[in-house]
Amino acid sequence: MRLIEELVGSFKDQELALPIWYENESLKVLDQTRLPFEEKIYTFTNVGQLGDAIRSMMIRGSGAIGICGAYGILLAALKSNGNTQAVREAAKLLKSTRPTAVNLMKTVDEMTSVAEGSGEELIVNVEKKAVEILKRQLEFEYDLGSHGANLIEDGDTIMTHCHSGAFGGAGYGGRALSVIRTAHEQGKNIHVYTCETRPYLQGARITALELKKFGIPHTLITDNMSGFCMREGKIDKVVVGSDRVAANGDLANKVGTYMHALAAQEHNIPFYTATSSHTIDFSTVSGESIEVEMRDAAEVTHFKGIPTAPEGTEALYPSFDITPHHLITGIITEKGVVSVPYETNLKKVIDQENVFQK
Ligand SMILES: CSC[C@H]1O[C@H](OP(=O)(O)O)[C@H](O)[C@@H]1O
């Protein structure tokens, strides 16, 4: 049995919701565009299929597409019998799919950095690295969930945005839902307000599904209700996910995050992003340098192909926005929570264990 098969087998012993997994020299991928009403699994036998799935958001979420970087390179190595050129081409293809989430870029680079030799030697090298990455990303979710749950008090109502959960991560709870799930599993009596997150509806379709699956009480709101809910005193804390954190703490996350952060500041509501050190991009000085993916405007004027606006209506779809660090109360990571003035470069801060609240 291959190492990767042993690892996936071990996942079955944990209560995970996997977005992707290895099986019989192919990749099984849950089609998230069909959630919550259908859990359709596709079998991919080449990286081109995986690339198309990432572009079309069949698989999405910075954590989940991060592990696609590991699985995709492993599949390329297996299908090419350990051919270096095939691995290089797979790396280029995967990194071209979506620009904002840094995890995908990082995991592809981690995998290609060990793609030495050829044949079975290369396959063994990349398989070991894939197993290391998959184990690490899942451990991150447990650890950041634990540190983040320390911020959650019994009776809290927590707002979240988009889907930063298991199907968007490594299978436990992604980022934001790792914090929320852990607090719930600690017995804290919490309630979640999940924003539907137009136009893909990650919140209505996937976050609500996962919170139901985890048994966590929740209320669905539209994105434009966040200010009302905060002003009415319904929200105690905001916890969102992350696609890329710049070296100064600026956050790239699903479009709408910035709007919620502004409202939270107005109402003195703590605003946290749940992330991992792997999502902090120390080579990007600030949020201004993060590329925001512009998706097809048809995703705004249509839902599942059904028009929601008059024919010919122009639309805009920035898939992410940038929340400046001064609006963020703390960055929750697997190492702890960083709540320090971000005048200092995060690189210096995050390497100093002592700054983390345990
Ligand atoms: C585990 S954090 C997931 C992160 O990714 C989402 O974006 P998308 O659905 O477009 O991949 C969103 O920004 C979430 O916060």
Image (cartoon, rainbow, N blue to C red):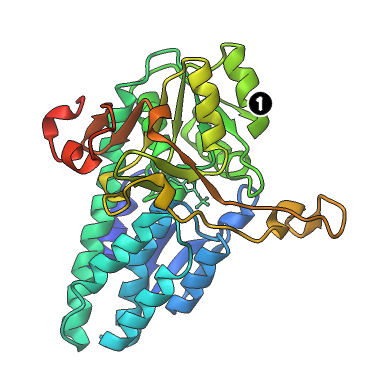
Q: Horizontally, is 243 left or right of 11 in the view?
A: right
Answer with the quarter of the image where residue 339 lies: top left
Can I make out residue 70 in this image?
A: yes
Residue 232: percent from left, percent from top: 62, 12
Q: Is mark 1 within 8 Å of ligand 1?
A: no
Q: In this view, does 302 lie above or below 28?
A: above
Which amino acid, mark 1? Met
Q: Residue at x 28, y 54 (%)?
A: 283
Q: Position of residue 18 (x, y in %)?
A: 42, 53
Q: Would you identify the image quadrant in which residue 349 lies? A: top left
Instruction: Return the residue nearer the eye: 315 or 112.
Output: 315
Whole-percent x and y of residue 350? Answer: 19, 38
**Foreground pick, 142 / 10:** 142
Q: Which residue appears at 53% of the width and 71% of the height? A: 52
Judge by depth and name the residue closer to the eye, 351 or 357.
Answer: 351
Q: Is residue 272 above or below residue 307?
A: above
Residue on which the image places disc 1: 225
On the rendered image, what quadrant is the N terminus found in? bottom left
Q: In this view, does 36 lie above or below 226?
A: below
Q: Position of residue 238 (x, y in %)?
A: 47, 26
- Which quadrant is home to the C terminus? top left
Neighbour class for label 1 at 10 Å: few (<14), some, many (≥20)?
A: few
